[in-house]
Image (cartoon, rainbow, N blue to C red):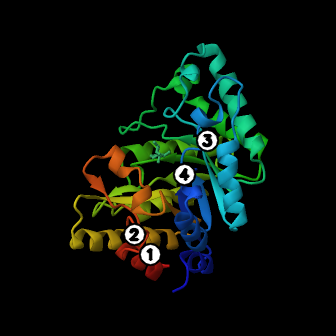
Amino acid sequence: ASPLRSLAETKGKYIGTELTGNMVNNSTVTSLAGAQFDMVTPGNEMKWDTTEPSNGNYNFGPGDRIVSFAQSHNMQVRGHNLVWHSQLPGWVNGVPRNQVQGVMEAHITTEVNHYKGKIYAWDVVNEPFNEDGSLRQDAFYNAMGSGYLADAVRTAHAADPNAKLYINDYNIEGVNAKSNALYSLAQSMLAQGVPLGGIGLEGHFIVGQVPSSMLANMQRFAALGLDVAVTELDDRIQQPASGASLQQQAKDYATVINDCLAVTRCPGVSQWGVGDADSWIPGTFPGWGTPTMYDNNYQPKPAYNSTATAL
Ligand code: XIL
């Protein structure tokens, strides 16, 4: 069978995976990832707690190793991420409010500049919204108000004008209060000339619960002139997984791929992890797991077959 990446490229899309430092040291993972996927997102290695663990001290070694793996396998890279309330080192929360903007801009400028020319797209701001559509009151919001998002995107653009600049979030795949708020924010940013380029729908689904409004939601963002990518796809199943749940998971993967194929401005779909053994799900959602296209031994599951068929 043709690798997923060849199938995706035939349709003008990419098919991506998340990789961490441990995974690029595992030859089973690297040979499968390099053969099947053409986009890589570092799982943790470009986050603030790794890249700037103390003020002004930068550490790009872990991210560089993922980028060089990607380059040597002709894969592109999604940079993940620049500004996020989580995996944020404690020192940032201790910065006086009147200095937070300077700290944020320095972090963005230094990281984007380091990777300049090597990054297809940046998740500039990650998970800025609460479920009701209000903005999270994190260090950035508390210091700068809602304008921090535009400032972050403009700062990233100045450092690498060729990277697509995204806002990325979860539970915004369908039409709901959270995605409505993001839609309004995106509209107003574009009206102000902010160089926002895309919306990332994380896609951390529960089996059988891909929203039926996902296609319409993608289309409304695309109609604003934005790209809309699925950035962190997984589809979790309560353990132990039944055969029926694995068949439903296969349908869910096909739905997501078909939604992307139906939207010209959807550049591709990225899965979070290569196989079930890599997934963050069992550690974060106890009792849940087996959310990817490959099983614990990196053998293809029904979701792999449905993805290949959809592509
Ligand atoms: C997760 C990683 O996979 C874990 O290893 C880490 O402990 C926590 O973060 N949304 C995101 C990702 O944007 O960065 C998260 O990744 C998963 C949820």
Three-letter amino acid code at disc 3? Answer: Met
Who's the residue at 38% across and 53% down the image? 175
What residue is pinned by disc 4?
Answer: 22
Dot 2: few (<14), some (14–19), or many (≥20) neighbours within 10 Å? many
Left or right, residue 100 beside residue 283:
right
Res. 189 mark: 3
Q: In which quarter of the image is residue 245?
A: bottom left
What residue is pinned by disc 1?
Answer: 307
Q: Which of marks 2 and 1 is nearer the N terminus?
A: 2
Res. 13 mark: none
Q: Which of marks 1 and 4 is nearer the N terminus?
A: 4
Mark 4 → mark 3, Cα distance in angstroms: 38 Å
Three-letter amino acid code at disc 2? Answer: Tyr
Q: Earlier in the sequence, mark 3 or mark 2?
A: 3
Circle 1 SS class: helix
Q: Is label 3 or label 1 in front? A: 1
Dot 4: few (<14), some (14–19), or many (≥20) neighbours within 10 Å? few
Dot 1: few (<14), some (14–19), or many (≥20) neighbours within 10 Å? many
- Residue 114 visible to the viewer: yes
Mark 1 → mark 4, Cα distance in angstroms: 26 Å
Three-letter amino acid code at disc 4? Answer: Asn
What residue is pinned by disc 2?
Answer: 253
Who's the residue at 68% across and 67% down the image? 73
Mark 2 → mark 1, Cα distance in angstroms: 6 Å
Who's the residue at 33% across and 61% down the image? 290
